[in-house]
Structures are given as structure tokens and as C-alpha cells.
Amino acid sequence: MALRFSRLGARVTLLDNGSRREIDKRLGTASLTRIRSLPERLGAWHDRTGRRIRSHDIDLAENYAALRALLSDCRPDIIVHFAEQRSAPYSMMSSEAGRYTVDNNLRATHNILSAIAESGIDPHLVHLGSLGVYGYCSAGLRLPEGYLPVTATGPDGREVRKEVLFPGEPDSIYHMTKALDQQLFAFHARFHGLRVTDLHQGVVWGTQTAETRIDPRLVNRFDHDRLYGTVVNRFMIQGITGQPLSVYGSGTQRRGFIHIEDMLRCIAYATRTPPNRGDRVRVINQVAETCSVDHIAALVSAQTGVPISHVDNPRREPEGNELDVDTSTLRGIGFTPRLFETALGPEIEDVQALLAPPAETTGPAARAVTAP
Ligand SMILES: NC(=O)c1ccc[n+]([C@@H]2O[C@H](COP(=O)([O-])OP(=O)(O)OC[C@H]3O[C@@H](n4cnc5c(N)ncnc54)[C@H](O)[C@@H]3O)[C@@H](O)[C@H]2O)c1
């Protein structure tokens, strides 16, 4: 996202405490693609484009003073808030991981809101929320974009109409933090007039973007482990390595998905159309399609020729669910997303190419190059 904004001509400042990399070290996991250090990545971007991105190692949950000072200094027009622990399975792994997810995510979000209010700046805050705040059951409804119209009867018998935040039922501690974030945004929008857009995003798939393709040092993460690897990544790796696709339970669990390129387009759209001061928090459902796990498995199986194997579901989740999502905002701007049906095949080929050892390290020419 930082690279996309930089390409679009924005002056980008990046804040990250490296916690995702630390979690990898603790779990003994790693991205299948090689992820360079942040300075190396930003150096590669500068080499290729001449554009500079500044970065600061600041823990947004712990170092409020540094965050506030930086915001007062930069006075950003737009803040895109990604900085949260993002794995639902990780948040459910242990009491410690759950408590870390709550402490980190809620404090980071609240510190950003407080720092904006305290420094008297007026940026548009765009938050990456999750479709999972609604819970994965639309119960006969189409999940609205954040707000549900309700009609209740007052004490005098008169009908009262209101729009309330959808009373979601998050299915993990991680999703609960995104649901609680909503309350923090609502309070600060009402109390301080902060301008906030909350993007209720589906599971992101896809590895490369137009910007990361320009240099191998810029490639994005590709996680395929059981905590951070999404179902799409895990099926792709099983397919590529010839192992049966392990579908949990019946595979009729439905989720919302969006390709990484479409995610960038949607965030860029959101930043161009800020709410006004005094508006309530704007919620956009950032989803390209909803799809069941067994359907994704069938597509990967057709592409790679490996069979599907149903295994006992190790997760506590409903066996199957309906999921009908209102995506009026994105449809309203003529958003035509990449869909699994046509884009999954090229993605599998992309991942295969990313994982193949580079030609120059295997052949005789490579030996000549690397020989002392
Ligand atoms: N990846 C998905 O499928 C998906 C889907 C819906 C929503 N989201 C949301 O989008 C955002 C980005 O997701 P991602 O997949 O790029 O995750 P990610 O883990 O790669 O990115 C989050 C970044 O925030 C940093 N961070 C975390 N806590 C921090 C703190 N206290 N201070 C400073 N930096 C901190 C991490 O080091 C990491 O680099 C997250 O908020 C996530 O919840 C992701």
C-alpha cells in the first residue's frame, strides 16, 4: 500500500514496529517468499523509482509520545491504519496470544485516535477492518455496510427508527478487536469530529502487485502455515507440491475474499472520498466475492490435478454458513474485481514461478557467476 501511494505521488511515511517479523521468529515460521529488511525494501523502491519512503520503528500500542510527536510533525492528510495483529487462529492459539492481540490492536487503534485528536490535525483515517466483525452468519439478512436500520417502540407507544452498528458476533478474539475498534471510531468521530472510514475487508489473496513486480526485493509475504496462511495459500501450496487439498469438515464454510490488487484500488478509492467532519464513521464492505472453502478447493484441484481430502475440522466454527454481503459502495463506483474463477489459475502459476529457484543459481552459467 505504501508503494502504491508513493507511485501515486504521495509523500509516504511508514510506521511499523516489526512485530509481524518477531511473531515469525517466535513461531519458527517464515514467508515462502524472501522478505528483505524494511530499509532494503525501501532502498529497492528508491533504486527503481527515485521515490523515497520514510520509515519509523514505532510501537503504536506502546509509544504514544513518539506517535503523537510524529503526527504533529508530519501533519498527514491521510492515515491508513494496518497496524494490528491480523491472524484469527493466532489470536485463539493461547491465552497469551489472545491477550496480546487485544492489548496490541485496541491500544494501537486508540492511540492513533487520541494522537489525532490531541495534535489538532484533521487527517482522514482509513482503517483495515474485517468482514468477520459481523460474524459469519447473515441469518437471512444481507449484511449491511456497518449499520442496521431498527424500529423499536418507545415508552409512549411511538415507533422509533434508528440505525445502529450491526450487532455482530465475531468468532475469534482477533475479530472481536476489530468489532471493538468500531466503538472507538464511533466515539472519536462523535466526540472529536474525526473523519474515519472503516473498511470491512474479506480475506486477501494474491502475492504480487504492480509495484512489487518491479524488483524481486519488493515481493510481498506468502504465508502458508496453519496460523497465518489463509485457506487460499494453503490449497495453492498443497496443489503445487502434489499433496491432497485438506478441506476442514464439509468445506461449506463461506468467507468473503478480495485480491490484493483490488484491495489497493479500494483503499485508494476510500482515501479519495473522505467523510466530512461530524459525519458518522463510514463503513464500506471491501469484498469481491463470497465463496465456500470446498469451491476454492475444487478450483485449485482442477488447476493442479491433486485430489481433495476432507479432514476433521480442528477449529471451533459452524460446519457451514450463509454469507450475503451488501457491497453497494464498491458496485456503485463500477468496481469490477478479479474473481477466483478466472484469476486463481494465473495466481497459481505466479506462485509456482516465485517458488522456483532462480535460473541463474542452478545452471552452469550460475556456477560461473558465483565461483570465487
Ligand atoms: N490479510 C488479510 O487477509 C486481511 C483481511 C482483512 C483485514 N486485514 C487487516 O489489514 C491489516 C493488514 O493486514 P496484513 O495482512 O498486511 O498484516 P501484516 O501483519 O502483514 O501487517 C500489519 C503490520 O502492522 C505491524 N504492526 C502490528 N502491530 C503494530 C504496532 N503495535 N505498532 C506498529 N506496527 C505494528 C506489523 O509489524 C505488520 O507489519 C491488518 O489490520 C489486518 O487485520 C487483513
Image: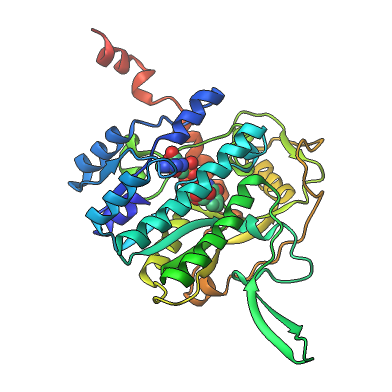
Q: Residue at (35%, 40%) from the top-left corner?
A: 58
Q: Position of residue 108 (x, y in %)?
A: 46, 48
The residue positioned 43% from the left and 61% from the top of the image is 126
Label count reads 0
28 in relation to 54, above or below: above
Q: How is the image coloured?
A: rainbow
**Residue 145 position in % (x across, y down):** 59, 70
Q: Is residue 340 left or right of residue 273?
A: right
Who is closer to the viewer here, 366 or 173? 173
Residue lying at the far left in this picture: please name it: 50
In the orientation shown, which residue stands out farthest toward the front? Answer: 155
* Residue 160: image location, x then y, percent: 70, 87
Q: Is residue 166 at all visible to an observer of this figure?
A: yes
For the C terminus, which image quadrant? top left
Q: Nearer the viewer, residue 327 or 371?
A: 327
Q: Residue at x 68, y 56 (%)?
A: 291
Residue 279 to residue 13: above or below: below
Return the x and y of residue 203 as percentages of the image width and height.
58, 51
Looking at this view, name the residue that lies furthest to the top: 372
**Is residue 343 among the parts visible in the rendering?**
no
Tell me: 296 left or right of 250. Answer: left
- In the image, taking residue 122 as reference, residue 349 lies left or right, namely right
